């Protein structure tokens, strides 16, 4: 990856999350992770658009890993006595609302940036959760997330080479993604306990996540200078240009797409809409005797 574990790690000063005392908080946190892993169904869309066999094989493997991660979080939540509940709107926006409309947007926004943010959150839970069985599961899963981020970084660097217009579009969309992280930070700051040993660091942690996102954009080549050197007006223009291009492409596509995809036409509900009612979620239970070795996530 273009950023190291040390660069992405936030210092919580040794503070820990207690499985009993913090059960309600952990339930909220792990439900955000659970939703994010369910959005792994989107990998199937990009498998169809893979530019070469190497990318297609990677995505095929990733789709299995994402579904494995769904079970990982169900195991953790069951061990901790947490129930599946809806994810926060900002998380749904970042994981589903920001789904790309092109291969370039997918690898840059969803894999390099989006999975990069998830990876930092995994690191944070590993460093703070005082529950070894859950942390052991996450330590295995994090190796897969690191591969996903690295793939996104490499593919983004390939697609933007010699394409200044595409770099600008991806930067504009990335600014919106970073705004979504700040919105999530504001929610946490207003709703979560400010005197909690770990939670008091959350706004600063999410700001650190945006710092890492900016650094990743610079190392990939999407951003050629610190964001602080780009005026607010220029940033607004970058966002407008990015979404203007997406809007124009969407309007042109309406000429040839069938009626069922028009905005007013009823849409098919995806698993991201229905997963909380899915029998696999509602009926999930650990095997008798806890979590045997064979049930632990294995490194492929």
Image (tube, helix red, strand yellow):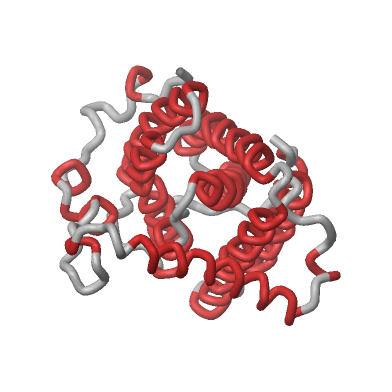
User: Percent from the top left, x then y, of residue 263?
Assistant: 26, 71
| Residue 159 image-quadrant placement | top right
Q: How many marks?
A: 0
Q: Nearer the viewer, residue 38 or 9?
A: 38
Q: Is residue 192 left or right of residue 219?
A: left
Q: Is residue 8 left or right of residue 180?
A: right
Residue at figure coordinates x 24%, y 62% from the top left = 261
Q: Is residue 98 above or below residue 113?
A: below
- Which residue is situated farthest in the front direction here? 255
| Residue 219 image-quadrant placement | top right
User: Percent from the top left, x then y, of residue 260?
Assistant: 18, 61
User: Percent from the top left, x then y, of residue 62?
Assistant: 43, 31
Q: Nearer the viewer, residue 294 or 120?
A: 120
* Residue 196 seen in the figure: no
Q: Can you say which quadrant of the picture contains the N terminus? A: top right
* Residue 249 seen in the figure: yes
Residue at figure coordinates x 82%, y 55% from the top left = 224
Q: Is residue 68 above or below residue 109?
A: above
Q: Nearer the viewer, residue 158 or 75?
A: 158
Q: Can you say which quadrant of the picture contains the C terminus? A: top left
Residue at figure coordinates x 69%, y 65% from the top left = 207
């Amino acid at each position: 990856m273009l950023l190291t574990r040390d660069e992405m790690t936030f210092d919580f000063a040794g503070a820990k999350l207690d499985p009993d005392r913090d059960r309600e908080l952990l339930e909220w946190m792990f439900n955000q992770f659970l939703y994010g892993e369910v959005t792994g169904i989107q990998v199937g869309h990009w498998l169809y658009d893979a530019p070469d066999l190497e990318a297609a094989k990677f995505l095929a493997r990733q789709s299995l890993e994402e579904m494995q991660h769904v079970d990982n979080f169900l195991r953790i939540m069951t061990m901790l006595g947490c129930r599946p509940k809806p994810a926060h709107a900002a998380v749904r926006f970042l994981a589903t609302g920001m789904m790309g409309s092109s291969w370039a947007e997918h690898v840059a926004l969803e894999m390099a940036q989006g999975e990069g943010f998830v990876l930092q959150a995994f690191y944070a839970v590993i460093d703070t959760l005082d529950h070894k069985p859950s942390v052991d599961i996450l330590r295995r899963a994090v190796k897969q997330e690191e591969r996903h981020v690295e793939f996104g970084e490499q593919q983004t660097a390939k697609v933007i080479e010699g394409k200044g217009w595409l770099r600008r579009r991806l930067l504009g969309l990335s600014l919106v993604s970073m705004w979504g992280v700040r919105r999530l930070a504001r929610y946490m700051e207003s709703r979560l306990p400010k005197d909690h040993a770990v939670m008091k660091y959350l706004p600063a942690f999410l700001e650190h996540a945006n710092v890492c996102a900016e650094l990743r954009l610079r190392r990939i080549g999407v951003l050629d200078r610190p964001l602080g050197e780009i005026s607010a007006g220029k940033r607004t223009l970058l966002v407008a240009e990015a979404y203007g291009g997406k809007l124009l492409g969407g309007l042109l596509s309406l000429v040839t797409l069938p009626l069922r995809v028009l905005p007013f036409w009823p849409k098919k509900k995806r698993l991201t809409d229905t997963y909380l009612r899915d029998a696999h979620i509602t009926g999930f239970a650990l095997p008798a005797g806890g979590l045997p070795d064979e049930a632990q996530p294995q490194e492929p």
